[in-house]
Amino acid sequence: MPQFDFANVFLPQLFWLSVLFAILYFGVVRLTLPKLGKVMEERENKVSGDIEKAEKAKLESDKLNEDYETGLTLARDEARKMLADTKSKAAASVEKKSANAQKKADEAIAAAQVEIEKARAAAMKEIEAVAADGASSIVERLTGKSPSKAVVSKATKSVFG
Amino acid sequence: MANPMEQFEIKDIAPIEYGQYDLSFTNSALWMALALVSVAIFLFIGTARPQLVPSRWQAAVEYLYDFVRKMLDDNVGPEGRKFAPLIFSLFIFVLACNMLGMIPWVGSFTPTSHVSVTLGLAVLVFVIVCVVGFWKHGLHFFSLFWPKDTFFLLAAFVALIEFLSFLSRPFTLAIRLFANMTAGHVLLKVFGTFVVSLGLFSDLPIVLGILPLTVTVALTGLEVLIAVVQAYVFALLASIYLNDAINLH
């Protein structure tokens, strides 16, 4: 195998390997990596910065959403309360009005009743007087003698009580 | 039949002598240089105009670099990132050498099929591991070999074995890569010669050559896979050895 002919192949290969590999290594360190490292770092920063920005925006939008939700709930509550208030007010006024009407009607009924009572009493008195007249004239016809007023009124009173 | 080992022959392109040392520019050096050039082109295009949203080339370079960085994060931890340029260079250099050797052309050469090259890279890793280990932990680095909570004699025995296995690391690292590359290329060469010799069978020309040709095509695919996997294994083992030096156990 030519590879093991060290006396002839070792030194020239090792020499050129050292030279060429040194060039490669320093080329990589001096030329490639600064450019590559810079752009890679820049990209990393940009990506992490973008992510940070996006996170911030998301936080903000979450907050806005929350605000909106609370606003909505508040408005809804208020509307509900207003509705309930209006309802109860309307109910109260209806009740009041109907109570007033009832009262008026009751008063009217009571007044009418008093009137009726009066009329009835007057009518009774008249009937009593007519009955007494009638009775005394009947008694006069039958007996020829008009009865005394006291007796007649006693008799009518006993009937009409 | 051509010798399947012939492809590993080192040929001088420009003989250079420095004193008594032979530093000739050979075909191996040429293909290492080609690997360097292709890597350089790849890296240059990839980072010519770095953009936040990467172009395809830039994405490819970034992907490879990220891959190495992630491997170091997984195997070494946060301190491993300092070694990302080294492991990245090793990975991409070995990968380029392996892949250029897969060009199906008689002149192509695989530097990583030479144990001199792989041993050079492995010794580099070994030396760096030792330097980092002693730099970080001083003589305490030797506790790497000592098993905890073990009976003294047994611990000493285990430590001896651990130490020997530690010393053998550059060789196993080098030989794994070199043997994989050499074996693959020998196999390809053997089946390649079968295509010719069977295809020339005069009573039934060409037909018999189809089977070894199919095998060669399939083997080429396998060898491409091995070229990538071995580059990865080399880089992975280098980072695991670095982990020993940085974190002990």
Image: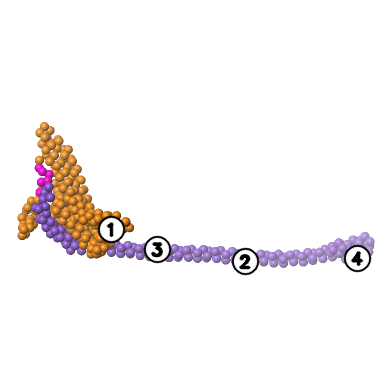
Chain colours: A purple, B orange
- Asked if residue B183 shows in the view, the reply is yes
**Picture coordinates of residue A38 (x, y %)?**
23, 64
**Picture coordinates of residue B200 (x, y %)?**
10, 36
Q: Which residue is mark 3?
A: A62
Question: Which badge, 4 or 2, comes first in the chain's sequence?
Answer: 2
Q: Which residue is mark 2?
A: A96
Q: Which residues are magenta?
A: B2-9
Residue plotted at (53% across, 64% down): A83
Residue plotted at (14% across, 58% down): A18
Which chain does tag 3 point to?
Answer: A
Q: Which residue is mark 4?
A: A151
The CA span between labels 3 and 4 is: 108 Å
Same subunit, labels 2 and 1: the answer reads no
Mark 1 belongs to which amino acid?
Answer: Trp
The CA span between labels 4 and 2 is: 58 Å
Question: Which badge, 2 or 3, comes first in the chain's sequence?
Answer: 3
**Picture coordinates of residue A39 (x, y %)?**
23, 62
Q: Which residue is mark 1?
A: B146
Which chain does tag 1 point to?
Answer: B
Give the farthest residue toward the top.
Answer: B203
Residue B7 painted magenta: yes
Which chain does tag 2 point to?
Answer: A
Q: Secondary structure at mark 1?
A: loop
